[in-house]
């Protein structure tokens, strides 16, 4: 078990470009979460999956954001037509479904800088 | 609705002295409460968790927290600070659905040599 992996760790892009982040959760974990964290703030919930089903989306997740988990394993978070306000750390976490369901294991995050 | 307030944005202590990071929560039911730590350029790590068992919860690295329902508090303590404790600490409450976490704004712990 190598924990939760996120790729890339850092991404610098120009405004208007599309970016995609990937998350590989702990293999036994059915639940997968995406959070966004800006400087000096705690993480903000974006969305969560139970297996391949996306069960909840925050109002923070505008129509430029889309997340998928097609086979119930890894997940991708895509941001289209990036804006400077999208600059943040994007965190992925996973958890088991039953006992300890609300104990999340986090990846190291993907830092996005939009110029 | 649930909410979490971390009362100090920064706490500075000398190495070897006690640490106290304060957290108050608001919840309409019996909550699950957590403390997470974030070291620079590293992922968030669970320090400890309260889920309606013992009110004094022991975590990793010598940290512990006490759930006080009457005060709606869940303060984090450590008897003796170490330089490696310098990090950002987040107090978290789980919402009723048990999957969405409500995060405090964080407390940055600074350790002076």
Image (tube, coloured by chain):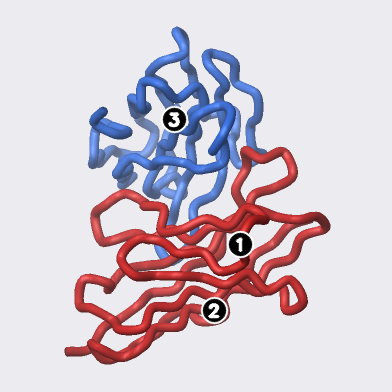
Seen in the image, is B58 located left or right of residue A110? Answer: right
- Residue B93 visible within the image: no
Foreground: disc 1 or disc 3: 1
Mark 3 vs mark 2, CA separation in Å: 36 Å
For this rendering, which residue is in front, B85 or B7? Answer: B85
Residue A112 placement (x, y as % from top left): 32, 43
Which of the chains is blue? A
Q: How many marks?
A: 3
Q: Residue furthest left?
A: B113
Give the colour chain B carries in the figure. red
Where residue A79 is drawn, which disc sits there? Answer: 3
| Contact between labelled residues 2 and 3, with CB atoms less than 8 Å apart | no
Q: Position of residue B53 (x, y in %)?
A: 64, 56
In the rendered image, residue A14, in percent from the top left (x then y), is placed at 30, 39
Say whether residue A23 is visible: yes
Nearest-to-viewer mark from 3 and 2: 2
């Amino acid at each position: 078990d190598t924990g939760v992996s996120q790729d890339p760790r850092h991404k610098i892009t120009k405004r208007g470009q599309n970016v995609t982040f990937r998350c590989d959760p702990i293999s036994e974990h059915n639940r997968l979460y995406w959070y966004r964290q800006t400087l000096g703030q705690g993480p903000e919930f974006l969305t969560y999956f139970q297996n391949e089903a996306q069960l909840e989306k925050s109002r923070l997740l505008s129509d430029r954001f889309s997340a998928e988990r097609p086979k119930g394993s890894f997940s991708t978070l895509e941001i289209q037509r990036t804006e400077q306000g999208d600059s943040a750390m994007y965190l992925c976490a996973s958890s088991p479904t039953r006992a300890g369901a609300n104990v999340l294991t986090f990846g190291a995050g993907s830092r996005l800088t939009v110029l | 609705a649930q909410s979490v307030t971390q009362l100090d944005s920064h706490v500075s202590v000398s190495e070897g002295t006690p640490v106290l990071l304060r957290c108050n929560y608001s919840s309409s039911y019996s909550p699950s409460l957590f403390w997470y730590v974030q070291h620079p350029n590293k992922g968030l790590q669970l320090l400890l968790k309260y889920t309606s068992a013992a009110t004094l919860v022991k975590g990793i690295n010598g940290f512990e927290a006490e759930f006080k329902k009457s005060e709606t508090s869940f303060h984090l303590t450590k008897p003796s600070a170490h330089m490696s404790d310098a990090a950002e600490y987040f107090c978290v409450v789980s919402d009723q659905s048990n999957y969405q976490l409500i995060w405090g704004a964080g407390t940055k712990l600074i350790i002076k040599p």
